[in-house]
């Protein structure tokens, strides 16, 4: 078991980042022109990094598998982005954002990184406003804020329910300026198939042109992976269908350690699964928990009657409703962190109080908010003694202004009007806190290979608080990586262009071709999706919201057997040297089949419950997660040794000098 060096700077917490920036090496502007950087992934993390690096003067090549950076999965982000601006004057500060994030992650993140995140959070908002991102504003013109889970302040900036899309338009515009200047060469519909190492350093990638099927070699002095999360290992998730682990996994196989793979976020407010026909789940943003109240019937007979369609939720009296989050967690109520809210929903549904046909749904109800806003609006509009219909109409107008697009999306999918009847929601896989291990500079264990955004193991510990992923991705891309990568590249100013004709590139390309050939040569009858669905079922049932040693041991065996079957029998139609989406999927699922096993192995070794990692054996009497700080206060980073079962664990012991380690409580 090795020990990892996080390269965290010394000194007081609040001075570390400034001190580090002052001390690291820089590359002068003239030399930057001679240095090439590959950025794989142009979502918020990669797009912001590419634009900033090019603005600084580096030559950047970007890669994404979509037809435009505009279509990265980041576009789906709905609710908002955090920053400690304290515009509400409600007591926010960098320290409080730092504290909330470390506590929210159940004390499994690196203090120095999280403090830096809080420190640059305000800059992100300024940067995005300067780009023209249309954040919501209050009547007086100031930027508006709302609240997200696990915090007692309002620090979430938002653009209706389309925050990710608007931020991505900002980053994409910044990229376009550089594309126009010739500083970014943008390769869309290109997939990174492998990382190329020369003398132990990341010096390029092998990519496939997804339209022509051609295999290409691209070299650079450093490679940044900003390729998103791996929630789709569960098959069903709120992630975009194409989200995958291939780039990170290929780097892992080349020597980048993979940290905390088992830390997955299961989001409490998603549209419930309806059957086996689905390939995608839909999120109802956490922002809805600002105004929506979550409940199930108090009486079992009411729950049964609702499931059987004999009773409607609006017919159940207030006194017969169990607002279980408000009951169990009075201080945070409906805005407890996601892991806590998800487990509480599962607990009620497992106890038989679920409210849809499958028994796996709870209500998210806006009736109180509609009445509250309606009354307020009537008062501010000078309407005296308004009747119920007027109040409802006014209240619905306010709700529509805040969450209109989310309500419309719900109605389109479910065919029920959520203004009139409560939404039905259930937890679903949403985000992965695990990822490539990086040091304070965002460098992986491969020199010259960096990871940003959801692709790295990030600052969120064992559970991410809402609206923190956009903050982290943009912090990495706009404000951290552009500094820290210079320290590494300062040693490369005399290296000159990296040749793509070296034996390392030749061999990497040959390996990519061989792997594709192998994928095409399966003689069985099952499609790639068949295997992906099977993997997803194992993951959800045995590595999902609750895990135990027996289930995890079974999962490890079952995934290994499924992987063997896949490689022998998968049927991939089409050809290798043309556009072939089945082949694309096959490559991605092959990597999920390895990652899934490592995920289970990681979950099995972590004999504690923390954040999204809930081991049934380790819980308190009232069902809360029970950490074991004595034995597991570390980041677990896995080194590839051939098969996932042989992966070797390395530990980065977490040091808490500024926050007292406590039992996490939201009561
Ligand atoms: C429905 C939904 C709503 C969300 N809402 C919020 C929110 O309100 N607030 C918040 O903070 N977070 C939210 N999140 C989380 C947040 O959106 C993501 O964590 C974040 O956008 C990830 O950004 P990224 O840049 O790291 O990755 P992505 O946006 O996923 O981008 C990945 C990029 O990598 C490229 N790529 C991947 N693999 C390869 C490869 N092999 N070769 C070439 N290119 C590759 C893709 O083409 C893409 O350009 C939400 C997530 C979901 C699913």
Image (tube, rainbow, N blue to C red):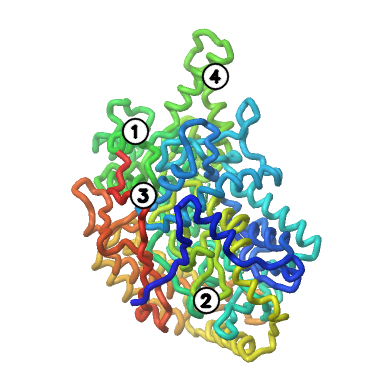
Q: Quadrant of ligand 1?
A: bottom right
- Distance CA(mark 1)–CA(mark 4): 32 Å
Work out whether mark 1 precedes mark 2 in sequence or the reverse, and give the earlier one: 1
* Residue found 45% across the figure and 73% down from its top: 257
Mark positioned earlier in the residue sequence (3 or 4): 4
In this picture, is 61 found above or below 645? above
Q: Mark 3 or mark 2, which has the lower sequence index?
A: 2
- In-image side of 602 versus 493 (left or right): left
Task: Provide residue 221's location: percent of width, then percent of height.
Answer: 65, 76
Disc 3 from disc 4: Cα separation? 43 Å
- Disc 1 to disc 2, how far (Cα)? 59 Å
Residue 377 in which image quadrant: top right
In this view, the residue in front, 301 or 409, is 409
Q: CA distance from mark 4 to mark 2?
A: 58 Å
Q: Which residue is mark 3?
A: 659
Mark 1 vs mark 2: in front: 2
User: Mark 3 and mark 1: span between their CA atoms?
Assistant: 49 Å
According to the image, label 4 marks what residue? 377
Quadrant in the picture for the C terminus: top left
């Amino acid at each position: 078991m090795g020990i990892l060096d996080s390269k965290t700077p010394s000194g007081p917490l609040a001075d570390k980042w400034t001190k580090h920036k002052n001390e690291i090496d820089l590359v002068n502007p003239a030399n930057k022109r001679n240095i090439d950087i590959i950025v794989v992934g142009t979502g918020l993390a990669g797009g912001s990094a590419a634009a900033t690096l090019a603005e600084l003067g580096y030559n950047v090549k970007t890669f994404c598998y979509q037809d435009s950076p505009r279509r990265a999965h980041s576009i789906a982000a709905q609710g908002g982005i955090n920053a400690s601006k304290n515009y509400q004057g409600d007591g926010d500060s960098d320290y409080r954002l730092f504290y909330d994030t470390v506590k929210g992650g159940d004390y499994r993140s690196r203090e120095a990184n999280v403090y830096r995140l809080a420190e640059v959070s305000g800059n992100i908002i300024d940067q995005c406003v300067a780009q023209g991102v249309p954040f919501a504003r209050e009547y007086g013109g100031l930027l508006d804020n709302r609240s997200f889970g696990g915090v007692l302040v309002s620090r979430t900036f938002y653009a209706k329910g389309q925050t990710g899309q608007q931020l991505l338009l900002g980053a994409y515009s910044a990229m376009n300026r550089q594309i126009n200047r010739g500083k970014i060469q943008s390769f869309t519909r290109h997939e990174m198939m492998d990382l190329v190492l020369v003398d132990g350093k990341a010096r390029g990638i092998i990519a496939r042109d997804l339209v022509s099927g051609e295999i290409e070699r691209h070299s650079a002095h450093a490679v940044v992976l900003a390729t998103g999360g791996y929630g789709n290992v569960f098959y069903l998730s709120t992630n975009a269908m194409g989200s995958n682990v291939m780039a990170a996994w290929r780097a892992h196989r080349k020597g980048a350690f993979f940290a905390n793979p088992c830390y997955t976020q299961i989001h409490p407010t998603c549209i419930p699964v309806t059957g086996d026909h689905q390939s995608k789940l839909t999120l109802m943003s956490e922002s809805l928990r600002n105004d929506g109240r979550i409940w199930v019937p108090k009486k079992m007979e009411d729950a049964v009657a609702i499931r059987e369609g004999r009773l409607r939720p609006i017919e159940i009296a207030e006194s017969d409703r169990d607002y279980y989050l408000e009951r169990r967690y009075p201080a945070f109520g409906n805005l407890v962190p996601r892991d806590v809210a998800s487990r509480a929903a599962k607990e009620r549904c497992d106890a038989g109080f679920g409210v849809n046909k499958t028994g796996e749904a709870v209500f998210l109800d806006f009736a109180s908010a509609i009445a509250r806003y309606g009354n307020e609006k009537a008062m501010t509009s000078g309407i005296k003694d308004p009747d119920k219909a007027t109040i409802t109409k006014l209240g619905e107008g306010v709700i529509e202004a805040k969450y209109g697009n989310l309500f419309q999306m719900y109605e389109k999918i479910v065919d029920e009007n959520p203004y009139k009847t409560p939404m039905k929601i259930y937890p679903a896989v949403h985000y992965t806190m695990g990822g490539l291990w990086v040091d304070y500079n965002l460098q992986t264990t491969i020199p010259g290979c960096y990871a940003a955004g959801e692709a790295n193991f990030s600052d969120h510990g064992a559970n991410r608080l809402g609206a923190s992923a956009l903050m982290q991705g943009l912090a990495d891309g706009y404000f951290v990586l552009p500094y820290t990568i210079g320290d590494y590249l300062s040693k490369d100013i005399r290296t000159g262009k990296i040749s793509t004709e070296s034996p390392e590139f030749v061999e990497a390309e040959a390996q990519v071709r061989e792997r594709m050939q192998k994928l095409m040569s399966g003689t069985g009858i099952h499609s790639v999706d068949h295997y992906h669905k099977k993997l997803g079922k194992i993951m959800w049932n045995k590595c999902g919201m609750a895990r135990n040693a027996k289930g995890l041991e079974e999962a490890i065996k079952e995934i290994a057997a499924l992987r063997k079957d896949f490689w022998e029998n998968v049927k991939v139609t089409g050809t290798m040297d043309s556009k072939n989406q089945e082949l694309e999927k096959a490559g991605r699922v092959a990597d999920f089949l390895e990652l899934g096993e490592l995920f289970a192995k990681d979950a099995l070794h972590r004999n504690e419950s923390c954040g999204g990692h809930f081991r049934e054996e380790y819980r308190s009497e009232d069902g809360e997660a029970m950490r074991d700080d004595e034995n597991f206060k570390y980041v677990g980073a896995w080194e590839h040794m051939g098969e996932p079962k042989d992966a070797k664990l390395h530990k980065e012991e977490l040091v808490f000098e500024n926050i007292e380690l406590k039992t996490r409580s939201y009561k």
